[in-house]
Image: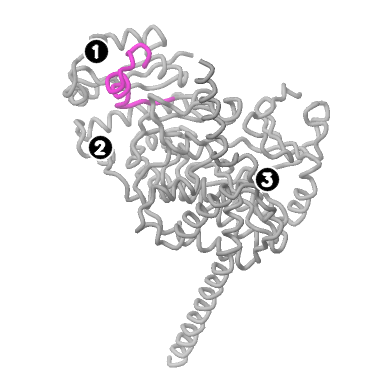
Amino acid sequence: MIHHTALEPGSFRDPGGRIFTSGDRILRAVMPSAAPAFELARQSGVLDRLVEEDRLVGFASVSDIEAVPQLRDASHVLEHPAVPFISHPYEWSFSLLKAAALFHLDLQIDLLRDGFTLSDATAYNVQFDGVRPQFIDHLSVRPYVEGEVWAGHRQFCMQFLNPLLMWDALGLAPNHWFRGTLEGVAPEDLARMLPLRKKLDWTVLTHVVAQAAMQNRKVKAGTPKAEKRGVTLPKHAFEGMLHGLRRSIAGMRNKAHTTVWGDYAGRNSYRADDALMKAQFVAEMTRAVRPKMMYDLGCNSGDYSVAALENGAGRVVGFDFDHGALELAYSRAQADNLAFLPLWLDAANPSPSQGWAQAERKGLAGRAQPDAMVALAFIHHIAIGRNVPLDMATDWLVDMAPVGIIEFPHKEDPMVQTLLAQREDIFPNYGNDQFRELLGQRARIVRTIDVLPTRTLYWYDRT
Amino acid sequence: MTSKTLISGFGILAMLSVASPAHAYLDPATGSIILQAVIGAIAGATLFFRTTLYRAKSMVLGIFKKSGNEDK
């Protein structure tokens, strides 16, 4: 049975292919213009090998869709397994971006060896399964023509190298900037920010400073000449650039900022058994609900995500605004190969739907349908830290998933008092009784547990 | 009134004449392509040098290993 088929609004840049959704199915139309390159890549076995190596999302030819008008002109229709959660590069931590950059370079290097190349270098084509990168655009793989320049070079610099350099050389998180431009950080902009000392590094000098200077000179000079046709880049030179960038990026570190939450577990107001009670409560909920996908809002280093995964949750997407915490969560997910993806999020200003027609890059709301969520030691940050009225904060959280656990720190809680210490208490409606009432109006309260005299966990169910 | 409009008009024209040409006309990757032409050769030579050095190293190490084995 064919469902209503809809064009995926983020898939329009390459006229050679389009992504459609049909019910739960993900379909890709390969248009006649892209068909020869795709056929060569498929016949060579390179695509199958990448799928086998788990570096490329799987694909299968589909023949039961002739009835769908949007797919009638396609030379091939492919079906893909759905990516568990689509994340955007501006939601990635330093380590996720670095992993994606190295993954992209390795893919390009290996393809080149097989006589293929990537037609672009967009970071949006890399997605994560847990924290393991995967490539999602089969039509970016095309035959390599000896001597051609690296088509994706500028894009690679903007979306991978330059944001990583902001971390490494300036100690700045590039997420706000990346989210603003969507295309990353231009060499012309980064070159203006870097101090002279940093500019002397070979990678920075060439890929950022020199590229920016040449770009600026060309803009000033006016009408460009068709340099693209004249310039050749021998294969060994191409490989040299790729290996050079790989070496440079592999050595980058996130030596940035002090961690706000990084050592939270050590200095918060809990004793260890309170953390244990929380973990047990989360475990109980996940055993009962068996969520295929769960959100962990304010995931910190992922303690409760892990508790959920060990007790029947299929996959957890965690969110935190502190990059130190995200680094801990990443290293944990990577070391233990967890189905846990920790992403950067400012809950008071979550990723919006944006890009072309404000639909190209989906915002947080509606991007996935988590079956459950946990928000532990979280609500006071938006309700008091960001002045969001308690009823609105409750609405937002309960809307996130049909079932979940919300921890409510009472007004008297030391963490809440810390937030109130430097300001007037303008929150007469912030209190445990008020929260219980607000939550009860929106969902059934399955169970509650007091993990401390000033902290209550609520298990809600609005199904 | 008319003179004010005239002055503004001249001002806008003057600004337009010195403004940089629109980016839309420019191949956005021009800087990248020229750069590749310039540094490609250096990058290629570096990789060649590194690979050769690596091969030489492993060859030397291989000889030492072999001779070590022969000693035993």
Observer able to see residue B63: yes
Q: Which residue is mark 1?
A: A427
Which mark identifies residue A264?
A: 2
Residue lying at 32% horizontally and 7% vertically, measured from the top left: A437
Is the same chain shared between marks 2 and 1?
yes
In this view, which residue lies farthest toward the front?
A: B3
Q: Does residue A284 belong to the magenta stretch? A: no
Query: Quick one: label 3, few (<14), some, or many (20+) residues within 10 Å?
Result: many
Mark 2 or mark 1, which is nearer to you?
Answer: 1
Above or below A437: residue A220: below
Q: Amino acid at mark 3?
A: His
Mark 3 or mark 2, which is nearer to you?
Answer: 3
Q: Amino acid at mark 2?
A: Tyr
Q: Chain of mark 2?
A: A
Classify residue A96 by image quadrant: top left
Mark 3 element type = helix
Above or below A382: residue A124: below
Residue lying at 51% horizontally and 47% vertically, measured from the top left: A158
**Bounds of the magenta segment:** A373-393
Which of pointers 3 and 2 lies earlier in the amino acid sequence? Answer: 3
Q: Chain of mark 3?
A: A
| For the residues bearing labels 3 and 1, Cβ distance under 8 angstroms | no
Above or below A218: residue A202: below
Is the same chain shared between marks 3 and 2?
yes
Which of pointers 2 and 1 lies earlier in the amino acid sequence? Answer: 2
Horizontal arrangement in the rendering, residue A47 relative to residue A182 (left or right): right
Q: Percent position (x, y) of residue B67?
A: 46, 90
Q: Does residue A388 belong to the magenta stretch? A: yes
Which mark identifies residue A138?
A: 3
Observer able to see residue A369: no
Mark 2 element type = helix
